[in-house]
Amino acid sequence: MTVSTADRPLLEVRGLAMHFPISEGIVLSRKVGEVKAVDGIDFAIGRGETLGLVGESGCGKTTTGRCILRLERPTAGQILFDGQDVSGLSSRELVGLRRRMQVIFQDPYSSLNPRMKVGDIVAEPIKVHGVERNPARRRTRVDELLSMCGLDPKFADRYPHEMSGGQRQRVGIARALALEPEFIVCDEAVSALDVSIQAQVVNLLEDLRERLGLTYLFIAHDLSVVRHLCQRVAVMYLGRIVEMAASDELFDHPLHPYTQALLSAVPIPDPRVEAGRAFRPPRGEVPSPINPPTGCVFHPRCPVAVEACKQTRPKLRELRPGHWVACDEVH
Amino acid sequence: MPPLLEVKELHTEFRTGAGLVRAVDGVSYTVEHGETVAVVGESGSGKSVGALSILRLIADPPGRITSGEILFDGRDLLSLSEPEMRKVRGRDIGMVFQEPMTSLNPVLTIGRQITETLEEHQGADRGTAERRALELLEMVGIADPRRRLRQYPHQLSGGMRQRVMIAIALACNPKLIIADEPTTALDVTIQAQILELMKSLTRKLGVAQIIITHNLGVVARYASRVNVMYAGRIVEAGPAEAIYHRPRHPYTMALLRSVPRLDRPRQARLDPVEGQPPDLTRLDGGCAFRPRCRFAVERCGETRPALEATSDAGHLAACFRSAELAAEEVAA
Ligand SMILES: Nc1ncnc2c1ncn2[C@@H]1O[C@H](COP(=O)(O)OP(=O)(O)OP(=O)(O)O)[C@@H](O)[C@H]1O
Ligand SMILES: Nc1ncnc2c1ncn2[C@@H]1O[C@H](COP(=O)(O)OP(=O)(O)OP(=O)(O)O)[C@@H](O)[C@H]1O
Ligand code: SF4
Ligand SMILES: [Mg+2]
Ligand SMILES: [Mg+2]
């Protein structure tokens, strides 16, 4: 089958796994086990699309993002970026890729070098990649990037600590855009921001997506922000994707018991709605990815688990068009 | 019955390199026995400093409580000696902070941290304290409590550590718990478990709570009354239902509009609070929200509006135009 470039997803992940070894001993360290941080996941993201990645702490969201960016070398699986498998590329071969993929981190405080002025922070990737060697033109480019992110170019002369959290996050975005990437991993990019500023940055990410045709992997724990920003959403649990669907479909008709528990735990900012809502937070805590449960990894906490759930690992099935679920108890 | 806590005209300042920061700038409110009051507001608006001031945990220098009264159970906490104050902390008022890792002692077992509190505040002997510690861990839903008592904080998950903090806060049967972002570092599901736990325990034991949080959903689910802070002052206060459905201050209105909601159709665009948070060292004599306010008029630049009653019972707002906003006469 031949697929034209236009229809081909920008990113396709197949059977991705990242197992971190656990070692014991300092001198003669030996492997005593492994953390199955990501344990065989498949998904694709189309050009200009935003895929949300949600799930409890430690379920492997950041690791997934780091593997795609090739900040980790995955244990298994393929990562097809624009048709090319990048999972095994050497660091030399990765140089070109680095320009096309960028990341925006959670913490606007620690991800910016406190001793550098904002202008130099944004200019750095342009300099390192030798994109623009002329300092005056580089400065113009930095001004452009800052304005595009809603910052007055005069901020170029400030230090990060002289700015607010929302302004610092805009600097992080301007830096990510400096090399005109096609794909950006937003890892909790708005989570640390004040509610009043969060909406500003979400709008900015949307504007940039439209204007520059960007594709995002949007990792976040705030489900209402994810629903707002993403066209499709994947729900992870203990290293696996348990459900994936178009955003409206997922939030209106969650099928996996874990997704249902997760959604019912989200409080709605309205006392009248909350007063009339019976809810039951999921029991227990996420088990360790070192010794994941057999069968369906959710079975120890699942309200509808049957004996078979302890034995066989359910596969992702397409229950409705575009709606994938890894649970054999939903039909 | 007089309120359990009455804060009157509290002022707390910090001397910083950039100038004087009036972190808490004339704050007054009450907390009744057994009720849950939420404090919400902009980052840096004085929520934490306000709470730490009640406990007199402001480091001097750079900070200082410059004036006000904090009447707790009939006594002014600001006039107590430090040893008397130490008895209030942990015994009469329990505390739960955002990052349990920094508030728990990393080199003491969980069990020891609980028994220490009990021995210090209630003069309990070792045996009694240990039995009570076990009971407390069971009460906060920690499985296998006997084993957990012998473990250190780093051996517990974030959710379990927060449960331990709640157990310690409840250890001496306090009348009030102050929780500053108690679940911000936790997952939605663990957050829901912890908050349900706090709600049921405080109901059962009749403990009042002050919960500081950014999460407007959490407030809607758990608080009976809400204080909204901006730039060191309470700009709106009242029953939760009134604050959410009839906000009378432009900041509250903008804040509520800015959060996307799972129970409503997806909006085309979010509606943020425009502009930047205020620089507390550069406040002028006018309303601190003025530079971001859609309703600002000339008068707003001249004096700071006081927190005054609105037409709603128990609902206060600090805005010159709140009556107009209520009547929806305002041309936006
Ligand atoms: N370099 C590493 N070595 C060993 N284990 C790791 C490493 N990086 C991550 N892990 C483990 O892999 C699992 C997945 O971690 P990851 O950071 O991807 O989770 P996450 O979903 O991003 O969580 P959070 O929501 O807390 O950011 C965790 O159990 C984590 O402890
Ligand atoms: N030790 C300190 N030295 C100087 N200024 C301080 C100190 N502690 C707090 N402040 C200032 O006091 C003001 C109020 O801070 P506070 O921590 O109460 O804010 P907050 O409302 O709790 O914010 P957040 O939501 O971010 O926790 C801020 O402007 C802060 O910068
Ligand atoms: S007093 Fe004036 S500036 Fe302040 S909130 Fe009211 S209308 Fe806006
Ligand atoms: Mg992460
Ligand atoms: Mg605070």
Image: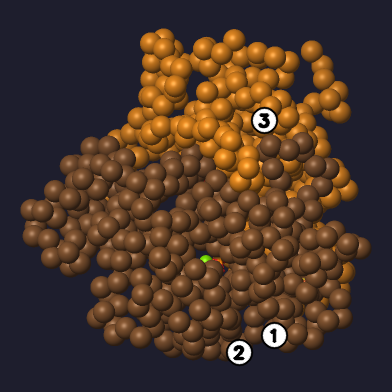
Mark 2 sits near ligand 2, with its Cβ under 8 Å away: no
Quarter occupied by the N terminus of chain A: top right
Q: Are marks 1 and 2 on the same chain?
A: yes
The residue most toward the front is: B1
Circles 1 and 3: CB atoms closer than 8 Å: no
Mark 1 sits near ligand 2, with its Cβ under 8 Å away: no
What kind of element bears circle 3?
A: helix
Name chain A's colour: orange
Residue A264 location, x and y as percent?
56, 33
Amino acid on which disc 1 is placed: Arg
Residue beneath disc 3: A251
Amino acid on which disc 3 is placed: Phe
What kind of element bears circle 1?
A: helix
Asked if one can make out residue A74 in the rendered structure from this viewpoint, the answer is no
Residue occupying the point 40% across, 65% down: B1
Residue B219 location, x and y as percent?
56, 52
Name chain B's colour: brown
Mark 3 sits near ligand 1, with its Cβ under 8 Å away: no
Residue beneath disc 1: B282
Please say if A39 is above or below B135. Answer: above
Residue A124 location, x and y as percent?
71, 65
Please tell me how crowded label 1 is: few (under 14), some (14-19), or many (20+) other residues with Cα within 10 Å.
few
Q: CA distance from mark 1 to mark 3?
A: 44 Å
Residue beneath disc 2: B19
